[in-house]
Image: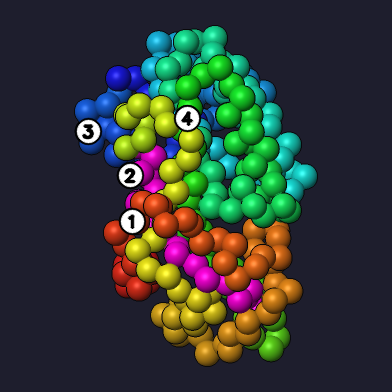
Amino acid sequence: MRVVVAGATGLIGSRTVARLRDHGVEAVAVSRAAGVDVSTGQGLDQALRAAEVVVDVTDAPSRRQETSTAFFTTATGNLLKAAATAGVEHYVALSVVGADRVDSGYFRAKAAQEDLVRHTTVPYSVVRATPFHESVAAAVIAGTRPDGVHVPPLLLRPVSTDDVAAAVAHVAVGLPRFGVLEVAGPEELRFEDATADLLTSLGRPDPVIADARAPFFGAVLGERALLPGPDAHAGHQAFTQWLKNR
């Protein structure tokens, strides 16, 4: 089986390529470094030649809605066109939990990407992931203020990038779902508690402030907006394990 992975140098892409190769799959890493540009379409037709599966784990350079929407619609559009031309049998796209219900920011951009995938002629699967463990660390940077770290009062099931990559690789070698698989971490946490644990691990005494106005991924969210459904696939690595190993 020949699987082309677009976005292969990113957090998920590099791990997905490794997972596939560990299981004897011919995984072709597609990136600008390999002479392929998904934003312009340069090199795509050649890269997808003889591919059976395309895995799209590309990500936008910004979480701003305008920038991310422009990136995903262009890049995914180019990938889907090349996939259809090459006769690809399965297109797997990585998205985010909440893309179907959060009508702002990065979530709207991912919804636009999903819409393109659903309306292609290529059989497809969508993998929606909850926020990565690394997202909590990014929120600390974004939310640091003179009076403490401001984070939204959300419930989360943060997931490890290894668990997401494993799920994406598993879906890629299976039959197209023509639907969505959600992937989440094994435990439900409050965002402010996870943030406090991270700060403790860093030796930072900053107070954590649950701020309903604090955005996450460019959107102000309801408490349960990022929780997956009851049928979500649960990963293995807990947030506390990630803290110990980082």
| Amino acid type, callout 3 | His
Q: Residue at x 36, y 35 (%)?
A: 171
Q: Nearer the viewer, mark 4 or mark 1?
A: 4
Of the 4 image quadrants, the one containing the C terminus is: bottom left
Residue indicated by mark 1: 235
**Residue neighbourhood size for the residue with mark 4, other residues' Cα within 10 Å, grouped as few (<14), some (14–19), many (≥20):** some
**Residue neighbourhood size for the residue with mark 2, other residues' Cα within 10 Å, grouped as few (<14), some (14–19), many (≥20):** many
Q: Which mark is residue 23?
A: 3
Residue contact between numbered discs 3 and 2, judged by CB atoms under 8 Å: no
Which of pointers 4 and 1 lies earlier in the amino acid sequence? 4
> Picture coordinates of residue 161 (x, y %)?
40, 53
Q: CA distance from mark 1 to mark 3?
A: 19 Å
Residue indicated by mark 2: 166
Residue indicated by mark 4: 178
| Amino acid type, callout 1 | Gly
Which of pointers 1 and 3 lies earlier in the amino acid sequence? 3
Over which residues does the magenta segment extend? 150-169
> Picture coordinates of residue 107 (x, y %)?
65, 50
> Picture coordinates of residue 142 (x, y %)?
65, 69
Q: Residue at x 37, y 68 (%)?
A: 187
Against 152, is 44 above or below? above
